[in-house]
Image: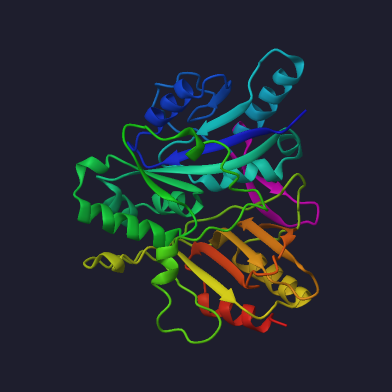
């Protein structure tokens, strides 16, 4: 049986997740979609404000390290759905999981990689985050969950954009793109978004290309004269969980992460670039090829130490000894890599990576990456 694609829909309280979901359900003609609502198990899609009663379970890995939190309630719901589909009791083609406004998407995403039964039936397609334009700046300043939802996203929609003026909207978009330069940011009017921006985004597909917002890269061109232009931007933390990117296979090759401490909440108000969010991102580029063994050692060590603080990371790499691109990505401690297509003859062979996380030690990352070049 083909894997069932799953979409995680997350976002700020009051950002219109249910409106978007209803719109998708009414417009996805001919597609049968199973919805796992909010607190997982609630049938009623209108039951928007529910008391969170969530179970997260720490999984003990076979190598003795404890690192990964999954949602036991979600795991059992997904397992039941898959069993009913196999038996022909339920007929559906995809799953959309709507989380509560205060949920951390980490353990939800991780459940798809850490539980064999779930991974054999479902393929995590993407994480979509809704941002309430009217309250976004305040929520990002005060809620680490809101920042993390932005950092995890493959696609961001701003709802209620008509309630703020264009300069405020520009400032919000700027802030979101610095926290997450790999997710497209679009406005959504009452949930009216094209289905192709919601379903089948392949955000966890290793061979999908690495799109980084071009304005983000431009902002970065000045002031760097050697071969990596890296940009750092905004991040935060409370404890964090791990998952991995896999294309049809698991890479259980991640390591323990001690849970990281509470964010040192720093707010710099004033000029709109100066929101010192805890969730930050930066891009690293290099023209020289990487030495495969050095890079593997370095990334393995980074993931082991900083995994809880890494939300999403992805790279398309120019690796010594192969004419094919090497693509890697990960979520928290779980990292997967794969050989991609061959470099075209007219293509500049350049490595490009983006890291999104909480108070990441950019200097350590850059130094380690530089030392991993061939």
Q: Nearer the viewer, residue 235 or 93?
A: 93
Q: Is residue 263 left or right of residue 142?
A: right
- Residue 339 location (% of width, % of height): 76, 59
Q: Is residue 29 left or right of residue 92?
A: left
Residue shown at 75%/44% (left/top)? 248
Residue shown at 71%/74% (left/top)? 295
- Residue 292 location (% of width, % of height): 76, 73
Q: Using the rendered image of the protein, determine whether residue 374 is visible from the camera's viewpoint.
A: yes
Q: Using the rendered image of the protein, determine whether residue 278 is visible from the camera's viewpoint.
A: no
Q: Quadrant of the C terminus?
A: bottom right
Magenta region, residue range:
56-73
- The main secondary structure of the magenta stretch is strand
How is the structure coloured here?
rainbow
- Quadrant position of residue 56: top right
Residue 66 lies in the magenta-colored region: yes
Q: From this viewpoint, which residue is outermost toward the bottom?
A: 225
Residue 353 lies in the magenta-colored region: no
Q: From this viewpoint, which residue is outermost toward the top?
A: 89
Residue shown at 63%/61% (left/top)? 257
Q: Is residue 63 above or below residue 289?
A: above
Q: Quadrant of the N terminus?
A: top right
Q: Is residue 257 left or right of residue 51?
A: right
Q: Is residue 27 above or below residue 62?
A: above
- Residue 204 location (% of width, % of height): 62, 48
Count of numbered labels shown in the rendering: 0
Residue shown at 58%/58% (left/top)? 210
Q: Is residue 172 left or right of residue 29?
A: left
- Residue 238 location (% of width, % of height): 48, 56
Q: Is residue 62 above or below residue 157?
A: below
């Amino acid at each position: 049986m083909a894997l069932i694609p799953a979409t995680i829909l997350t976002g700020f309280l009051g950002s219109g997740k249910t409106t978007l979901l209803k719109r998708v359900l009414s417009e996805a003609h001919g597609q049968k979609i199973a919805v796992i609502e909010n607190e997982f198990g609630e049938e009623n899609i209108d039951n928007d404000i529910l008391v969170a009663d969530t179970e997260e379970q720490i999984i003990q890995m076979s190598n003795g390290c404890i690192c990964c939190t999954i949602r036991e309630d979600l795991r059992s719901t997904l397992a039941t759905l898959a069993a009913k589909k196999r038996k022909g009791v339920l007929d559906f083609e995809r799953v959309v999981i709507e989380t509560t406004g205060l949920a951390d998407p980490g353990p939800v995403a991780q459940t798809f990689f850490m539980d064999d039964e779930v991974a054999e039936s479902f393929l995590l397609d993407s994480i979509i985050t809704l941002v309430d334009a009217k309250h976004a700046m305040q929520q990002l300043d005060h809620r680490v969950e809101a920042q993390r939802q932005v950092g995890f996203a493959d696609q961001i929609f701003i709802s209620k954009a008509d309630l703020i003026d264009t300069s405020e909207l520009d400032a919000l978009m700027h802030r979101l793109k610095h926290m997450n330069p790999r997710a497209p940011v679009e406005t959504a009017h009452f949930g009216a978004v094209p289905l192709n921006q919601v379903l089948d985004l392949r955000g966890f597909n290793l061979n999908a290309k690495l799109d980084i917002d071009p304005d983000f890269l431009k902002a970065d061109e000045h002031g760097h004269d050697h071969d990596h232009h890296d940009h750092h931007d905004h991040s935060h933390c409370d404890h964090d969980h791990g998952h991995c990117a896999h294309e049809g296979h698991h890479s259980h090759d991640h390591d323990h992460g001690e849970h990281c401490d509470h964010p040192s909440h720093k707010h710099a108000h004033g000029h709109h670039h100066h929101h010192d969010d805890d969730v930050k991102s930066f891009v690293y580029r290099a023209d020289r090829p990487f030495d495969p063994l050095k890079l593997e050692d370095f990334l393995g060590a980074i993931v082991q130490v900083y995994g809880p603080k890494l939300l999403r990371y992805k790279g398309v790499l120019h690796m010594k000894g192969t004419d094919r691109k090497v693509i890697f990505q990960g979520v928290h401690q779980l990292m997967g890599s794969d050989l991609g297509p061959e470099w075209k003859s007219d293509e500049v062979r350049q490595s490009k990576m983006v890291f999104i996380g909480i108070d990441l030690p950019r200097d350590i990352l850059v130094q380690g990456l530089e030392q991993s070049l061939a």
